[in-house]
Image: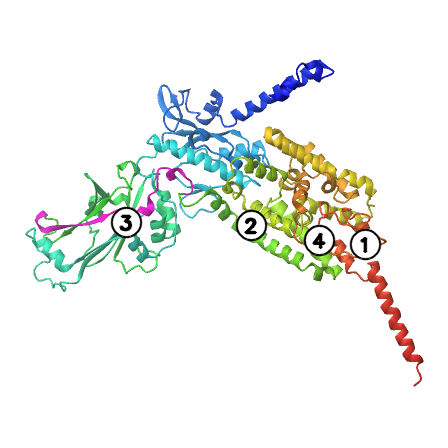
Amino acid sequence: MRSIRRAEPIGKGCKQPTTCLRSVAIGLLALLLMLTLGTTQGRCTSPDAAALRQALPQADSFGGPEGEPPAIPGYRNGSLVGYVLSSWQVVQSTGYSAKPLEVLVGLDLEGIITGVKLARHHEPILVIGIRDSDLEAFTESYIGLDIRRSIGFGVSQDDGVALDAVSGATISSLIINDAILRSARAVASSRGILGNAESNLRFSTFEPLNWDQLLAEGSMRQLTITVEEARQAVEANSGTLFAKGVPEPPADAVYVELFAGLATPARAGQNLLGERLYSQAITKGQPGDQIFFVAGRGLYSFKGHSYRKSGVFDRLQLVQGSRTFRLQAADHTSLEKIPISSAPNLREIALFSLPGNSGFDPAGDWTLELLIFGAGGNDTGSLALFTLPYHLPDLYRTSEADSTSILGPDTALWIEAWRYRQADIVVLSIGLLVLTAILVFQDVLVKQRRTYLMVRIGFLLFTLIWIGWVAGAQLSVVNVLTFLDALMHEFRWDFFLLEPLIFILWGYVAIALLFWGRGVFCGWLCPFGALQELLARLARRLSIVEIRLPFALHERLWPIKYIIFIALFALFLHIPELALKGAEVEPFKTAIVLKFDRDWPFVVYAIALLTGGLLINRFYCRYLCPLGAALAIPARIRMFEWLKRRWQCGTPCQSCAYSCPVQAIHPEGKINPNECIHCLNCQANYHDWTLCPPLVERRRRRERAKKAAQKAETEAPS
């Protein structure tokens, strides 16, 4: 307030009142714009009619948002046909830095996704390397999928659906997938679309177990009936167990031993049946169908023979509460054997299924009833009833909040991302170990110039081809801006863990900054930098003359990249979308992520920079790269000085300064850590007895001394 009072009257503080008024007006407008952006960032706008029809095309009219969580009902001829929901309104779906990510999802009354539309995002993960056509094709792949199924990427271990992630944007695919499924399942559960059967159950998780382990945890239940127990039960109903004249087994012999359990969960079913049979059993029925495993051994058959004529099993039935479910022959599959280890020798093995609309609740307790017929056959006076109760183990249950997660309560989204890229993580880790060995033992490597050059070119090819074009792990200034923004707002590690290769690279670069400076990334791990250097080496082979700018001019061009970085950071704090567009100053997305498959202006820009790099080695790195500038700022905190110098460096020797590919060595011999790419070229010179002047002079003195000694020896009298 004091500064405003000092400015009054305007004529005293400003020689041109009109100019001052214009400045004040512009400032107020800018402030208003910033406040508007800040207050609307987390607010969700209502979808228009076109977006609603795209999400739920079978509806001809829509109501207003209702219920908890909120969703917009869709009607056809006045009848409810489904819902349209916003992932942001339902589950507060976010991407990096906890900024809103809104996806509109259409859902019919059977739990089938009818349409998906990406309505809003503010995240760089959805900007780098992704085109609108890629996102449209990806979201369209969800149409027709049942949200009861596990939906993910890669090879699924259970009965899930495997989708293709957006090329070069696995992180974006995972986040969109999570937003769609968590919000859709939350709405479906609240509206009874999922029913009580599977709304709070974890049936898709799998862990290899043997027969004894399934019994111990309760996934399988066991009922053992001896001959004596069966006889007493039948005789209690005025019947006899064995007909006259039939030899009776010992009283303690097993008359029937029954094993039963719910086989719908992958943990039970896939272990019992094996992956192939379990997958066939699951996909044979409809979503919501339940599968039961029943096996037995002993003298008595739990199946009998009458089911082949009647179509109904008369010795088994399933009871839940007041309801009795008769097991049908049409829903029965007989098995000869099962692949699970430690299983006993079983006389009979069967799978039974109940349709999803039968009213059976897999979350509730149920009982398998076994009728034992005595010598009187199916005479009601000659039978006994035994029961095998089943209680679903708690390990299959989850909380209401967790029931909507695509991964279950024990698995975070970033863990799935790391599982999906296990092979890539291994390859990258090996590459970083090799680079670490190069840097630690650099003195040994550079003494053999030919070996050093082979290693240098080989690693640059690995960086360009595998890290860049294959894995798509090109670091960007957008990563830096996002990290700084997260530090100032809500920082969450799980957002950065979503892209494992980028996370590993940044972790390595952070450590390298402490030991070697920024040059480790710029000189060894940047795919675009590798592309520039390899092309420059090829240009020298083709006799294209390199242009070396005068050091005074070269030095004055360095600040450009710092200005670009500061400008991008300032924009990102207030208008992130504009900053992300400004980050296109980096050609990384065009040349590396999209491999030049982009609109022609971007391709021309990238090629122009590469062409400049043919004449001025690493032209972009030297003068324009905002990522290099961002890394150069903390580069001076490095703990060690690995690059060796002599007092003759710079005065009078200029050999290393002249051969430095980025002119990072000052005329007086000092290496500028903000510009050095740690290529080790100067270190190869340092150990070269034919190139480094101090070493050359030392070698010549030794040669002269040796010749003098030899001459003295020959001239000495014998």
Residue 612 falls left or right of residue 138: right
Of callouts 4 and 2, the N-terminal one: 2
The C terminus lies in quadrant:
bottom right
Work out which residue is located at the far bottom of the displayed protein and give it. Answer: 718
Residue sitting nearer the eye, 73 or 143: 73
Q: Which residue is mark 3?
A: 261
Q: Considering the numbered disc 1 on the image, is that residue within a helix, a strand or a loop?
A: loop
Label 3, residues with CA under 10 Å away: few <14, some 14-19, many ≥20: many
Q: Considering the numbered disc 2 on the image, is that residue within a helix, a strand or a loop?
A: helix
Name the residue located 10 percent from the left edge and 47 percent from the top edge.
380
Q: Considering the numbered disc 4 on the image, is that residue within a helix, a strand or a loop?
A: helix
Name the residue located 89 percent from the left edge and 72 percent from the top edge.
707
Image: magenta residue range? 380-407
The amino acid type found where label 2 is placed reads Asp
Q: Looking at the picture, does residue 712 appear above or below residue 638? A: below
Residue sitting nearer the eye, 444 or 278: 444
